[in-house]
Image (cartoon, rainbow, N blue to C red):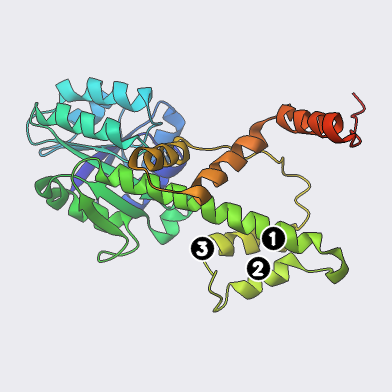
Amino acid sequence: MQMAMIGLGKMGGNMVRRLCRGGIEVVGYDRASEVVSQLAKEEGMLAATSVEDAVTKLSGPRVVWLMLPSGDPTEQQIRALAPLLSKGDIIVDGGNSNYHDSQRRGAWLAERGIGFMDSGTSGGIWGLENGYCLMVGATAEVAQIMAPILKVLAPSADRGWAHVGPVGAGHFTKMIHNGIEYGMMQSFAEGLELLRGKKEFELDLAQITELWRHSSVVRSWLLDLTAEALKHDQKLTGVAPYVPDSGEGRWTVVEAIDQGVAAPVLTLALQMRFTSQDGTGYGYRLLSTMRNAFGGHAVKHTNG
């Protein structure tokens, strides 16, 4: 089986490597020509000089997988791709798109006889070695055609991938997955900060996180990664206290509001990331000012 991959960044590039090593013929294109040349040389990927060139190198039914930033870049590429494809061809969006956009795009492509699959893709930089968790939304027919590719990308042919529902369901499932991820990460961060704060015990966080990895109820891949990081540096002095948030965390909270479902952990985890992004610290300054105004509490002044 063959396919094209558009977007050869960290995720897209490693997915190409896994696909080529699994016997899938891949035509690849990225605006960074050096990345295209490297993958062609190292993995046997067929290099394309443009999206149009990638499409012409495929035989039907043609499959074009996009690994692009969500929003306008993905929208523009799908709009440009559609005239190049024929009935029965398939576009896959493996990025972190909003599921509402995926539903709309799927319907628009269906009117033209072009199949669409939204693939929620998890695994990060470890996906090449361990495989990717793939949550896909599509018609049964498109899912069946795509199964050989999904089986190669997943940890194994019979696990780590699933056709979870119609178009939009894949990105919706990934959105909730990332919301849960926010909560888990925040919980570990708060708990470990409490352990570190108990100075009288002189706790070794590397020892404790490594301990928890074995038969503990909280063992997880996130804990594995945390234990490995703390093994090398427990003070994290070189890490800035700034945590970005992806669109999916925000969309999850909006979905909870739309459904009227209480999701305080996921919501507060997102809000804590907002707090880290406030470089001015204005909210905290205002809190300190208010405490001083009503209670005469001392205000700690900066040197600036």
- Residue depicted at 83% across the width and 32% down the height: 294
Q: Which residue corresponds to mark 3?
A: 221
Q: Residue 164 appears at what percent x and percent y?
A: 23, 53
Which quadrant would residue 103 be assigned to in this image?
top left
Q: Residues within 10 Å of mark 3 (few under 14, many from 20)?
A: few
Q: Residues within 10 Å of mark 2 (few under 14, many from 20)?
A: many
Residues at circles 1 and 3 in contact by the CB criterion of under 8 Å: no
Q: Is residue 19 above or below residue 91?
A: below
Which mark is first along the chain, 1 or 2? 1
Which of discs 1 and 3 lies nearer the camera? The answer is: 1
Which mark is first along the chain, 3 or 2? 2
Decide if residue 76 is in sight here: yes
Residues at circles 2 and 3 in contact by the CB criterion of under 8 Å: no
Residues at circles 2 and 1 in contact by the CB criterion of under 8 Å: yes
Q: Amino acid at mark 1?
A: Leu
Q: Amino acid at mark 3?
A: Trp
What separation in Å lies between label 2 and label 1 (alpha carbons)? Answer: 9 Å
Which quadrant would residue 167 be assigned to in this image?
top left
Which mark is first along the chain, 3 or 1? 1
SS assignment at label 1: helix
Q: Is residue 41 above or below residue 55?
A: below
Which of discs 2 and 1 lies nearer the camera? The answer is: 1
Q: Which residue corresponds to mark 2?
A: 209
**In the rendering, which numbered label is found on residue 251?**
none
Q: Which residue corresponds to mark 1?
A: 192
Q: Amino acid at mark 2?
A: Thr
Q: Residue 116 appears at what percent x and percent y?
A: 18, 37
- Residue depicted at 21% across the width and 53% down the height: 163
Which quadrant would residue 104 be assigned to in this image?
top left
Instruction: Give the quadrant of the C terminus.
Output: top right
